[in-house]
Amino acid sequence: MAHKHDPNEKIVFIGDSRVRKRDYSNVTPPDYSAFPGKSEAFIPNFLLKEWMVGVVVLVGFLVLVVAEPAPLGYPADPLNGSFIPMPDWYFLFLYQLLKYPYASEDYLVLGVLGLSGLPFIALLLAPFLDTGKERRFYRRPIASSLMVVSLVAVTYLTWVSWHHYTGELEKNGVIPEHIEREIKAEEAIEKGLPRPIPGREKIPAMVAADDPAFTETMTQAQCISCHGAELEGANGPALRGIGDVLSKEELVETITNGKGDGMPPFKGTLTTEQIDQVATWLSTQKAGAAE
């Protein structure tokens, strides 16, 4: 204690031992930083981390899609006996698994329901069966062993399925449709030709494409919306080569009164002269006529 007004005098504070120190730990809850590695605020900490991980995964997926687009084969042809069907790569392991005797033929029900249902049921019951608090994989031998076995099995079955597929291609001398289609497209572009449209290679060339019956009348009547901009067929049948199928009189009848539910009648929309002009031009659309 100070007894004088001397500024250099040493001041000593004497505490009273009868005053107890209060514990405020129960009044103010501790911050999550007091428990490192055990707790974290959901907003914004945890949510921000999950959002960043999602962005990275999405960007990686988009890069993969742009760099390696999905292969596109020809339209389905049930008469093509050389075609070897294959599922997407993430289903190859299941595709190979269903080839084994215990998952097909007499055991088809077991293969379809059992092999696909058991993993689903196991994942559904996993949170209820594995209730341990330990999260280190080497201290969870059962769950870790099942995970490792599953990854090894999926990898092995995927490799076997792809190896068998490539072997069948080499054995039969078959080029996959998406590769053959790309080769033909590159060859057409190098020759200055338009990219071939699968399934329409045999469509005859258009005759007199600059005729007013096509450039004016048919365009005004919106015929190209169904038959295609070059009559190659879009939402309706192709009209190239139609002169080999229908006569001029039949074409006039079809244009005037329509046919079925797809072809509407143009009586009243086009004049008789316009219908005759279009039918005359369509009757010249024959295979080999453009050569």
Image (tube, grey):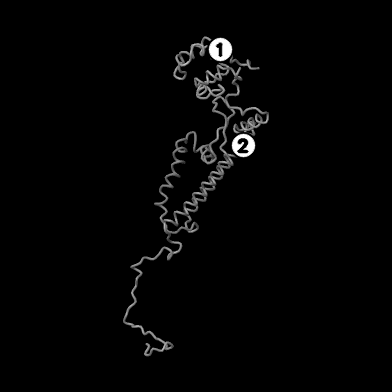
Of residues 21 and 142, the one nearer the viewer is 21
Q: At numbered mark 2, what does the secondary structure look like: helix, strand or loop?
A: helix
Given the image, on which type of amino acid does mark 1 rest?
A: Thr
Of residues 31 and 168, the one nearer the viewer is 31
Q: Residue 75 at what x, y percent from top left?
A: 55, 28
Of residues 249 and 273, the one nearer the viewer is 273
Q: Residue 129 at what x, y percent from top left?
A: 41, 52
Q: Residue at x 36, y 85 (%)?
A: 14
As drawn, the residue found furthest toward the left would be 18
Disc assigned to residue 166 = 2
Marks 1 and 2, how far apart at CA: 53 Å
Looking at the rendered structure, the number of numbered marks drawn on it comes to 2
- Earlier in the chain: of badge 1 and badge 2, it is 2
Q: Residue 250 at what x, y percent from top left?
A: 51, 11
Q: Is residue 259 visible?
A: no
Given the image, on which type of amino acid does mark 2 rest?
A: Thr
